[in-house]
């Protein structure tokens, strides 16, 4: 029997609410900051096509698997996996990947909040005197007006050098995340998603149109869609696979947790497809928002992680109405980041409620507070603790600062392990009838899903895991 209530009685008020929240979870810094950064660094087209293949052949089957587990389990990730295992005569030990996911989500939200804090600072800088300009009836020129490229680059360095500033931004962002999660599923998470996601799409479309008018869209299309297959090295494939998992929020039990709040109905297949399509469309649109502007000003698309914080602010400030659109750009990232960070914090919070019997407030406070503290270590890694290498004994992380270590360890180890165990569990252990009736897939779709989740996903994800951990295999 499929239970119809969650252990806490919480749930989405409609299918639309679930879709908005799940798309909100998927669409985040991964789409707007990391995807264009990686596409730029990896030379464009070939990366983009390989990434899209990863999303639909590996990501989509995993999205459906996680939502299925939550839908059946109706409680936190650990409890949900246990329930599916019990109904499939499998070992309750499989619940371990729910615990790995919850720990990964907890670690990711700690540095995610720090990076979102940088975005918050830039939104503040770029929008700083907007209200003053409006009140005075003057054109809005923005705080960066007249600064040259070196001065704008210097701003990022100055921000990193200031622990107090980074801390204040991190505190503000984590505070908002914690506040929303503490309010609960329907009055917190769902409400935030139903206000913020429409706002996000309006901003996105507005900025893409701006880029199309003011920027170089032809060069962008050529860059993103002309594959030079010689650039598709094993390292590039590896990072495309990892990015697909991260962007779809896979391997951290996020979609198990959100899926557990679905109260009725099936159609899980089409919902999953919608999430994957929306997430990928946003990543591509982010490319069509950023690169036209980068190319218009003749800047380098391969700037790396500073693309968004150094290249773009400079590009914007040379363009018509650039101050306003630059400000809106950072607001857009911030909105995307909030709807993702709440999904991250929700995973351990639900675990505390479901497995420990804590109240929602207590659980959110413990994990939000803990992540805040880890985030402080991450941000100090940019200044007073810049010499600290937490996993320095491990050659893979020998040169990696605190934030990048937490990012790298979760992304290269924990997410692939979570995804690998999920695919083996669903592909080989879960009861076939339970899968069929819960997902409501047509026989053909069901057959394709079973094939991908049982064979392609475990093999491909195992390859990411191993090549990610031992890059020397790839000759790097
Ligand atoms: N998918 C989010 C992004 O692209 C990050 C995320 C990962 C959110 C895992 C939730 C869970 O930014």
Image: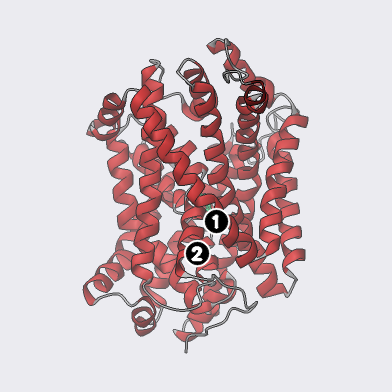
Q: Nearer the viewer, residue 49 or 203?
A: 203
Q: Nearer the viewer, residue 157 or 241?
A: 157
Mark 1 neighbour class, 10 Å CA radius: few under 14, some 14 to 19, many 20 or more: many
**Residue 51, position as x, y percentages in the image:** 33, 45
Marks 2/1 in contact by CB < 8 Å: the verdict is yes
Q: Report if residue 204 is visible in the image.
A: yes
Mark 2 lies on residue: 17
Mark 1 lies on residue: 193
Quadrant hosting residue 288: top left
Confirm or reject: label 1 Cβ below 8 Å from ligand 1. Answer: no
Q: Nearer the viewer, residue 235 or 199?
A: 199
* Badge number at residue 35: none
Upstream in the sequence, badge 2 or badge 1? 2
Residue drawn at x 47%, y 19% as measured from the top left: 315
Left or right of 389, for residue 290: left
**Residue 421, position as x, y percentages in the image:** 46, 65
Q: Quadrant of the C terminus?
A: top left
Q: Report if residue 41 is visible in the image.
A: no
Quadrant hosting residue 228: top left
Quadrant hosting residue 7: bottom right
Q: Nearer the viewer, residue 28 or 397?
A: 28
Left or right of 389, for residue 31: left
**Residue 305, position as x, y percentages in the image:** 51, 30
């Amino acid at each position: 029997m499929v239970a119809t209530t969650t252990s806490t009685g919480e749930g989405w008020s409609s299918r639309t609410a679930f879709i908005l929240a799940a798309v909100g979870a998927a669409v985040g810094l991964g789409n707007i900051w990391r995807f264009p950064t990686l596409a730029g660094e990896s030379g464009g087209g070939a990366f983009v096509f390989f990434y899209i293949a990863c999303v639909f052949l590996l990501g989509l089957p995993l999205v459906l698997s996680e939502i299925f587990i939550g839908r059946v389990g109706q409680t936190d990730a650990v409890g949900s996996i246990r329930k599916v295992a019990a109904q499939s005569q499998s070992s309750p030990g499989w619940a371990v990947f729910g615990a790995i996911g919850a720990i990964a989500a907890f670690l990711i939200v700690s540095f995610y909040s720090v990076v979102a804090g940088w975005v918050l600072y830039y939104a503040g800088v770029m929008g700083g005197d907007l209200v003053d300009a409006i009140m005075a009836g003057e054109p809005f020129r923005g705080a960066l007006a007249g600064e040259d490229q070196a001065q704008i680059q210097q701003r990022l360095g100055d921000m990193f050098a200031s622990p107090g500033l980074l801390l204040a931004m991190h505190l503000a962002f984590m505070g908002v995340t914690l506040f929303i999660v503490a309010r609960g599923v329907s009055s917190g998470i769902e409400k935030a998603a139903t206000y913020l996601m429409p706002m996000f799409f309006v901003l996105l479309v507005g900025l893409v149109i701006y880029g199309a008018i003011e920027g170089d869209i032809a060069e962008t299309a050529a860059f993103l869609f002309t594959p030079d297959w010689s650039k598709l090295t094993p390292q590039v494939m590896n990072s495309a696979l990892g990015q697909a998992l991260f962007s779809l929020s896979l391997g951290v039990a996020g979609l198990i947790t959100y899926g557990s709040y679905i109260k009725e109905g099936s159609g899980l297949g089409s919902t999953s497809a919608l999430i994957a399509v929306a997430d990928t469309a946003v990543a591509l649109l982010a490319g069509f928002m950023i690169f036209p502007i980068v190319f218009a000003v003749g800047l380098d698309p391969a700037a790396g992680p500073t693309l968004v914080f150094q290249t773009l602010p400079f590009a914007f400030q040379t363009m018509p109405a650039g101050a306003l659109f630059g400000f809106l750009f950072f607001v857009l990232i911030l909105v995307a980041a909030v709807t993702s960070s709440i999904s991250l914090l929700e995973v351990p919070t639900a675990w505390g409620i479901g497995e420990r019997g804590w109240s929602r407030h207590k659980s959110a406070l413990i994990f939000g507070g803990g992540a805040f503290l880890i985030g402080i270590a991450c941000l100090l890694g940019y200044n007073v603790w810049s010499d600290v290498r937490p996993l320095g004994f491990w050659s893979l992380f020998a040169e990696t600062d605190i934030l990048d270590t937490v990012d790298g360890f979760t992304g290269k180890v924990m997410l692939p392990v979570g995804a690998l165990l999920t695919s083996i569990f669903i592909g080989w252990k879960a009861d076939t009838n339970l899968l069929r009736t819960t997902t409501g897939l047509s026989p053909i779709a069901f057959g394709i899903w079973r094939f991908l989740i049982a064979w392609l996903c475990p093999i491909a994800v195992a390859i990411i895991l191993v090549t990610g951990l031992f890059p020397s295999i790839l000759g790097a």
